[in-house]
Amino acid sequence: MKFTKMHGTGNDYIYVNGFVEKIENPSELSRKLSDRHKGVGSDGLVMILPSEKCDFRMRMFNSDGSESEMCGNASRCVGKYVYEKGLTDKTEITLETLAGTKVLRLWLNERKKVEKVTVDMGVPVFDAPSIPATFEQWPVIRYPLPVGEDGIYEVTSLSMGNPHAVLFLEKIDELNLPVIGPIIEHSPFFPNRTNTEFVEVVPGGLKMRVWERGAGETMACGTGACAAVVAAVLNGVADRKTTVQLRGGSLEIEWNEESNRVYLTGDAVTVFEGETELEN
Ligand SMILES: N[C@@H](CCC[C@H](N)C(=O)O)C(=O)O
């Protein structure tokens, strides 16, 4: 099987051309190849597939094999992949995902390489059953969530196609994410688990660490950065157009006031091309 290793702001996935490669069990393959010691090493696997209603379809699997509805960083890399490999010559591309159709806008440099991509991430969703979450009232803003022996953390929760819990804290560098992350990920308030963003308000924007559902701490999360800005606006601590600094770099987010849509802009980088043998 041929694959391409790519990253968006350090959030790295293995990209497979599903027009050519037929994968029987992408969930199991993701678990295997994502292993950083015994596999290729990644936060998961992304299948690029034909679509009946859009230019392309994306399926995204976390490193634990679970399938997510949406991935912001992967969407940008899919845009770069399909353009630079000649699967399309469009610079505005529609992408079918489990969270609906997303529109990608490619930004080319003078050598016609994709330097960055803007993704129209759609509108944030606040009603708890759609997140899904079991809070009785919404929007969920600074809800005191019990987090194991660590006590109570105030969470703002919403869906960007996938579930998010956003916490505003001071000094996020000092947090022990491998302890707090899994407790919130598996909280009974989130029946399908949740991604969790730990956000510090800093001069010029937001600084964020993320514990991703199904992958643990990653260098960046696109849907998470969008959720963080929406939550920050609701909490009155950021502007609608904000830079989010992550461990893997920065993302530009705009929650447009007129359309209510969220736009994510960031890099898309090819790391290497590879080939691996698929066991039966
Ligand atoms: N890193 C992604 C989100 C990937 C999926 C997530 N872990 C989930 O299970 O919802 C992004 O850039 O949005």
Image (cartoon, rainbow, N blue to C red):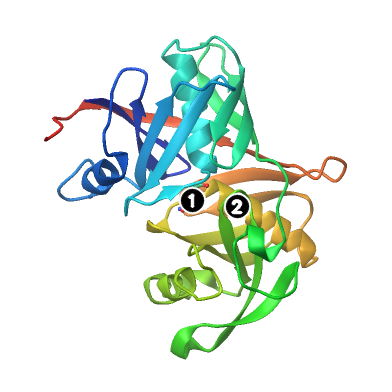
| Place of residue 107 in the rendered image (x, y in percent of width and height, measured from the top left) | 61, 22
Decide if residue 218 is on the left or right side of residue 29.
right
Decide if residue 111 is on the left or right side of residue 85.
right
Q: Residue at x 61, y 24 (%)?
A: 94
Task: Say if disc 2 is inside 8 Å of ligand 1.
Answer: yes
Disc 2 crowd rating (10 Å Cα; few below 14, some 14-19, many 20+) is many
Q: Residue at x 51, y 43 (%)?
A: 71
Q: Residue at x 14, y 48 (%)?
A: 38
Give the structural element (helix, strand or loop) at label 1: loop
**Residue 105's quadrant in the figure?**
top right
The label number, if any, that marks residue 279 in the structure image: none
- Any part of residue 158 in sight: no
Task: Say if disc 1 is inside 8 Å of ligand 1.
Answer: yes
Closest to the observer, 73 or 20:
20
| Place of residue 115 in the rendered image (x, y in percent of width and height, measured from the top left) | 53, 25
**Residue 264's quadrant in the figure?**
top right
Task: Name the N-terminal-most of marks 2 and 1.
Answer: 1
Q: Residue at x 58, y 49 (%)?
A: 223
Closest to the observer, 128 or 88:
128
| Place of residue 246 in the rendered image (x, y in percent of width and height, measured from the top left) | 52, 53
Disc 1 crowd rating (10 Å Cα; few below 14, some 14-19, many 20+) is many
Give the structural element (helix, strand or loop) at label 2: helix
Q: Which residue is mark 1?
A: 220
Q: Which residue is mark 2?
A: 225
Residues under numbered marks 2 and 1 in contact, where contact means CB atoms less than 8 Å apart: yes
- Any part of residue 127 in sight: yes
Amino acid tagged 2: Ala
- As measured in the structure, the alpha-carbon distance from the residue carrying label 2 to the one carrying label 1 is 8 Å
Quadrant housing the N terminus: top left
| Place of residue 272 in the rendered image (x, y in percent of width and height, measured from the top left) | 29, 28
Decide if residue 64 is on the left or right side of residue 184.
left
Amino acid tagged 1: Ala
